Image: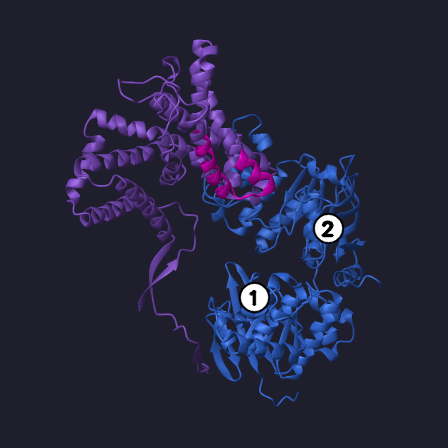
Amino acid sequence: MTASTPPVLVLNAISKQFGDIRANRDVNWTLQAGRIYALLGENGAGKSTLMSILAGRYQPDSGTLQLKGRAVRFHSPAQALALGIGMVYQRFMLVEPLTVVENILLRGGRIRPRRARETRCIRNLAEHYGLAVKPEAKVRDLSMGERQRVEILKLLHRQADILILDEPTAVLTHAEIDSLFAVLQRLKAEGKTIIFITHKLEEVLTVADDIAVMRRGRMVSQLAADRVQSRHDLARLMVGREVILNVDKPPVTIGEPVLSTDGLSGPAGTARPAFQHIRFDVRRGEIFTITGVAGNGQEDLVAALTGLAPLAGGAITFSDRTYTASQWARRPTSGMAYIPEDRDRTGAIGAFSLVENFMLTRLGTFARSFLVNRRGAEQATVDAMARFSIRGSGIQGQAGHLSGGNLQKLILARELSRRPDLLIAEQPTQGLDVQATEEVWQALLKQRETSAVLMVTGDLKEALSLSDRIAVMFRGRILDIVSAREAADIDRIKLLMAGLGEH
Amino acid sequence: MAWRIEKRPTSLAPAPVWAFPAALGFAVAVGTCIFAALGANPLAAYWVMLTGAFGSFFHFSEVIVRAIPLMLTGLAVAVAATMLLWNIGCEGQLVWGGICAAGTGLFLAPHLPPLLVIPATIAAGAAGGALWALIPGVLKAYLAVNEILSSLLLNYIAIIFMEHLYFGPWRNPEGYGFPGTAQIAEMGRIPHFFGTRIHLGLVLALVLAVVLYGALRTTRWGYRVRAIGLNRRAAHYAGFKIRRHIVGVMLLSGALAGLAGMAEVSGIHFRLQQGLAVGYGYDGIIVAWLARLNPLVVPLMALLLGALIVGGEQLQAVLHLPASISMVLEAVLLFGLLLSEALSRYRLVRRPPAANSDVTQEEEAT
């Protein structure tokens, strides 16, 4: 590819904001035809938003797109596809009871006629690109790999020449990944442009011609794949050089283990465990953090630890009592408080008032008997709002109207007021502004003076700033537990997050 | 510039106050068209309905008589729907309440101390409805069977079973072949007031409405039920036993519908016969929705529907128009309310026309 060829697609200062969150900030990117682009970045870096803008699902707040030299603006995915940009989403958009052909021909809620001719055309297309799939098969009978091929065929049949694939290998087996890569090479040889989002560094080095890295909504790095020396370089690029914030961290004497796990696996009832061989202690007086790139089993592990999902195996010792996997889920929730990741849909009830939300996990206190002690709950809510400087329209206002930071502080206040032996905080500052983040951090640091704290976060800065020890999860296992004191440890954590534990 | 309809950014706002008057106006307008189409003078027709329902104390007492079972089935639907359970099976639960009340009055009463006969009848009615609702409740909680279908289909079984009883084993031997059981003895009938057909069921329904309202707002159980209805994930997170609450609320809902059947049998018909399953269970759904699931508003909406039913009967008697017009008006009223609620989520804004739906290709700005 010579530099003189005009680019097929140019992104010019694309920005997109959702509420308070700036998902994309001034993203510039120039793509050439006939190349495979890998788009890297942590969860929440803005990759999916950017791709959804390219595919016409979102409109940018500012910035322009230039396709084959012409400025374009899409109002729908159909328009983007009409001009040749198509996307395969992580969750496939297929109608399961219909056949492959019907899915491909389905357009605007109708299936186009001339079935026989179209079937032949699709068969040829599939053979040409090596996308092995039976045109007359029902989609519900297909494997994930075959469904993905149907999605790609759908785009090719509509003559897309820029194909966006969102984590295409996440659902595939090894053999399917190899054949996908063969298809991608074939598409590239035909002059198609491919963008794929991934977390897996080996894949990047295997198929990508160019690498783009996003962090916090910005495009931070673009380079040709052959300029990357090692996977280590890539890992650093992806996670970035985060600095530990100067958080005032008073020394606390470490006490006895509050929670000990041994050989945990789960969740029960699935063929492939999301996590296994999990073993760690959380001691009174420390913040123990589990970190890792999202989707490596942390979410399932937390659900099992909090008793919300069943464990498949292992043992848990909590407050000096040991439970088997099946006993754990039936155990009363006393002694443990949990700040869930999804504060809007799990941690709080939007249509309830602040008082009612403050009672959610504390009915044992505010409704000891049959009746709810509303006055007591109101007083406790007023106190909590003062102590955590929660700003809202009074305790009878709806929680759904609170800002993210204020809602999180309300949940935090509620969970801390349970006086737990163990506090589990999951992504405690995700999406919060600087001040709210600071307040939540201070509260967590203070909490470790009286209890053990287990934090689960994908934000390395947060992990390094607060934690006493950090466990890194990758593909369902804890690769190592590191004490985050020295720069060497920090580098090591980054490598572990990328799955490079052997060095 | 052009007008555009767009969705309001928040859906948490309470339903607007104009929704109900608008629905009522919509129903009156549609009714006017129907009367006109049938060749009747709409004003005269409405006058007949109005005087038929409210023209005298006797007429109004009949409205109340119709409203009593509607209050109970309305409460039954409302309490279940508070937890997002759609109990469409109130009709069947009402029938079972009637069967059990009749059975108690006919066969158990002679063996009971007289003072216990009416309490036993009430308890049997509630239990009958509750047990019938237990089936869809358990299926829903433990096997994820859709309660809309299971509860609805069980209605037909209940009705056919009731017919089997009064055509067969429970048929009155001295009834000259007329299908129906023997009459319940005097001591098995619930008391009446003011020399009308208004019976103890009214007191029961009003007390239960207040109790239910209070319970949902001030008790631990009520808190949990509302939380589960609003956000099941959060309720699960808080450790509430969702399955148990599903079963419990279905039992309660069925018991309320069963009481409606009990009140019809022990307060109106005094026997099991044709005319018990006339749709109060289904009308309860309309009552509950018109009341926005608020137990305190349910009795008012039940009265409104009762007035429509009685007024419709007067249309037939006086103007020889079909009484089923009242059902049409009920339906239009509900549609009108749902429509105004749906519309209230949108607003009209004035803004420049968006780029047309074709692909716009603009020249680059600079």
Q: Which residues are magenta?
A: B135-162
Q: Chain of mark 2?
A: A
Residue A383 visible in the current orientation: no
Q: Nearer the viewer, residue A135 or B5?
A: A135
Reading the image, the residue beneath label 1 is: A49
Q: Secondary structure at mark 1?
A: helix
Residue B112, given in percent of the width and then of the height, sits at 47, 11
Residue B312, image x, y percentages: 24, 37
Front residue (pair B78, B45): B45
Amino acid type of disc 1? Answer: Thr
Q: Which residue is mark 2?
A: A289
Any part of residue B325 in sight: yes
* Image quarter hosting the N terminus of chain A: bottom right
Principal secondary structure, stretch drawn in magenta:
helix
Give the residue type that dot 2 points to: Thr
- Residue lying farthest to the top in this orientation: B113
* Pick the front one: A101 or A281: A101
